[in-house]
Image (cartoon, rainbow, N blue to C red):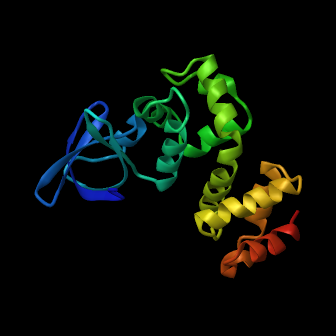
Amino acid sequence: MIEFIKGLIAEKHQDYVVIAANGLGYRVYVPSRIIEKLITNQESKLFTHHHIREDSQELFGFLESSDREVFHLLIGVSGVGPKVALKALGQFDANTLLNAISREDVTTLTQISGIGKKGAERIIIELKDKCGALDMGISSMQDGGAVVSRPVDQDVYEALRSLGYDNQEVRRALQNSANTRKHCETVEDNIKVLLKHL
């Protein structure tokens, strides 16, 4: 697994860049809105997904790890391949996509090339429950909050959902309790603090 690539942007193309690193040039497929931000001959770091098939191997790259996590969610949906997921993240950032899925916003998702109404509905059905914890983590990172590790995030989210709280309530509590939770390492500690804000 290639976690990330750091090197000079040697070339920019419509849907990929070539990164020069350690004497090699890596073709990395990148969302269009990210390609616009990359500057030729400037060093950049891209979080990568190494996609392996029987007949090919491809690298997909993202400036933010949150974009890569949403990419992983999308390609896990039946009928959504890496190129369609790349187009989705070229059009919308991770937060926008997660919010659209959480709100069951078919209209937003069908704006993505390659995703029709049935595809959008399938994405919502398969990912609505999964995207809650990831959305919670991204929101708190953007708000400068302390984020626990991903397994704890998932467990905290599922525990609070089982108690009847919705995504919005959990996100609000997470943001309001960010300073208090800085030293919380366990699920139990996080839940104790979050319950005071719910």
* Residue plotted at (79% across, 60% down): 159
Q: Does residue 52 sit above or below 174 in this rendering?
A: above
The number of discs equals 0
Choose between 134 and 172: the one closer to the eye.
134
Regarding residue 172, the answer to whether it shows in the image is no
Relative side of 22 to 27, left or right: left
Q: Does residue 118 sit above or below 153 in this rendering?
A: above
Choose between 32 and 87: the one closer to the eye.
87
Determine the residue located farthest toward the bottom in the rendered image: 183
Q: Does residue 181 sit above or below 24 in this rendering?
A: below
Determine the residue located farthest toward the front in the rendered image: 54
| Residue 179 on image: x %, y % | 71, 76
Relative side of 97 to 174, left or right: left
* Residue plotted at (56% across, 22% down): 111
What quarter of the picture does the C terminus occupy? bottom right
* Residue plotted at (70% across, 39% down): 128
* Residue plotted at (68% across, 55% down): 136
Which of the 4 image quadrants contains residue 180?
A: bottom right
Which of the 4 image quadrants contains residue 181?
A: bottom right
What quarter of the picture does the N terminus occupy? bottom left
Determine the residue located farthest toward the left in the rendered image: 23
| Residue 194 on image: x %, y % | 81, 68
Regarding residue 188, the answer to whether it shows in the image is yes
Q: Does residue 158 sit above or below 183 in this rendering?
A: above
Choose between 141 and 114: the one closer to the eye.
114
| Residue 150 on image: x %, y % | 59, 63
Choose between 147 and 82: the one closer to the eye.
82
